[in-house]
Image: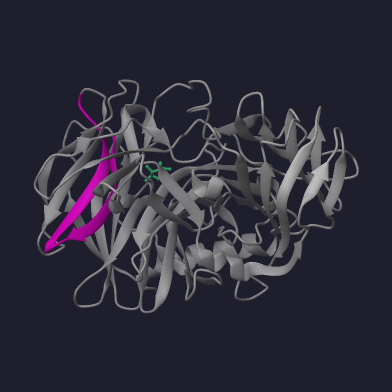
Amino acid sequence: MREQIEHAETANRELRAQRVDRWYPKFHIAAPAGWINDPNGLSHFRGRFQVFFQHNPFAPVHDSMHWGHVSSADLVTWRREPIALAPSVLEDRDGVFSGSAVVSDDDRLIAYFTGHRWRNGVDEAEGNLQVQCMAVSDDGVTFERQGVIVDCPEDLLHFRDPKVWRTDDTWYMVFGACSAEHRGEVWLYTSQDMWEWEFARVLFRDPNPEAFMLECPDMFPLETAHGVKWVILYCPMGPSPSGYQARNQHNAGYVVGDWTPGGEFVQLTDYRPVDWGAQFYAPQTFEAPDGRRIVFGWMGQFGSPLPSVEDGWNGQLTVPRELTLDDDLRLIQRPVEELEQLRIHSTDLGEVSLSAEEDRLLLDDVDGAEVELELDLTRTDAERVSLAVNRTVDGHETLVSFDDLSGRVAVDRRAAGAGPRGYRAAPVPAGTERLRLRVLIDRASVEVFVNDGVAAVSSFAFPAEGPKSIRLTAESGRAEVRSLRVHRIGSIWEQDRD
Ligand code: FRU
């Protein structure tokens, strides 16, 4: 595999030399150049957080999947690492697909991933031939392949994305499958030694008959007021849009239930979206050494290319978010607290009253920012209160709005400088009197957290050329803001040249 990795590294360096940085993320993980999709192999090994990702080093399109790699001691500053896995044997001829990594008792990093081949050798028309593979690393950087550990059942067209964890003394692996009846399922295997795996059961079948495959399933426990509950995150392929939900070509959601090793998964909640934004997919979690459950998602899209393709890159990961469950078994996600270290200049604007149609400058010359805002809904009668981000003199902008008519927080890209338009919106919990928004604004994206993480909206939002400002506006009524803080955000990269 060494040869294939060297070849990929060389090609990627050439692509990197031509990268244009006007939109390249300042504080989100992205490929140095080329394509990124799912976060893979999230783990903590040898004192560092390890983030691998689906990566095409040759071009900013989804093709020839490798595992790219970055690492960090603190979840704030990241270092580029060499490509970790490259297609190099028959089983992964058409891609080293998604998977996970765990640390063994003898302190090695064990990666599990899908070896992918098209049955007809050219495309997906006759389905995939997908097997689960294993690779081992002593240093977290170079891996040795160990071959196939779970073969593909004959009649399955999709069978991928192993996620491994340990409960008590047993190792568990879930992955996504398209059943013989074309239903999306999560399959569970077990192992005592990490090498020999046995089928245990079909753990979950999506009740939605439109879902024919569940990509990137993840399963993990979280403490709640009702005891420990298990979350299954997954990405159903197939469901059609419904109201504000499933608007993207690819959507991620979750269910919560009860599970004990050896038993069935008992679903307690309906399917809910993880994030309401236009670009959020394939989330993967891991447990940090201090017990926090942390998730990264992929911000990107298959199908239509993002405008950054002309700059030599495509896609990014979300910031790391800590996951918890509230009393209603809703997933709460907040940027990990370490991210506050990225604030390089903060201004506290205190209480702010806006009259109808006012449009007030909060920050100019923005190159990475964060806004924290608390809106007093009992004293606000505006129809819409918006942070206009990426505002340029030519009138382009993206609106992050509280919309009183729909009772939602929306990211509206109708006037974006480039790229996809349209809007996405998350519900504001009924009865909310103080609406808290936390908005992370990178060079081409926004991530919005509503009421300390009860909902999130993550979308790419490409600005036009020229200096960008952030403004606060109220339409058809007043806005009473109880607190407002703006921060400039620094870079996550260890070296500027990254
Ligand atoms: C999800 C996915 C996975 C697959 C990988 C390929 O985005 O399609 O199911 O392993 O991406 O890059």
The image quadrant that residue 285 belongs to is: bottom left
Q: Main secondary structure of the magenta part?
A: strand
Q: Residue at image x 43%, y 38%?
A: 252
Q: Which residue is most to the front?
A: 378
Q: Position of residue 205 (x, y in %)?
A: 23, 31
Of 310 and 192, the residue lying toward us: 192
Determine whether, in the image, residue 381 is placed left or right of residue 134. Answer: right
Can residue 402 be seen by looking at this rendering? yes
- Above or below, 408 relative to 74: above
Which quarter of the rendering shows the C terminus? bottom right
* x and y, in percent, of residue 43 in the image: 36, 65
Q: Which residues fall within the magenta stretch?
A: 158-180
Is residue 398 something that shows in the picture? Answer: no
Q: How many marks?
A: 0
Residue appearing at x 27%, y 25% in the figure: 207
Q: Nearer the viewer, residue 364 or 174?
A: 364
Residue 42 painted magenta:
no
Residue farthest to the right? Answer: 393
Q: Position of residue 223 (x, y in %)?
A: 29, 54
Where is residue 480 drawn, in percent x and y? 75, 42
In the picture shown, does residue 269 fall above or below 109? above
Query: Quick check: is 175 in the magenta stretch?
Result: yes
Q: Is residue 131 left or right of residue 18?
A: left
Task: Tell me: 38 left or right of 267.
Answer: right
Nearer to the camera, 233 or 16? 233
- Residue at point 13% right, 53% down? 190
Q: What quarter of the picture does the N terminus occupy?
A: bottom left
Looking at the rendering, the quadrant in which ligand 1 lies is top left
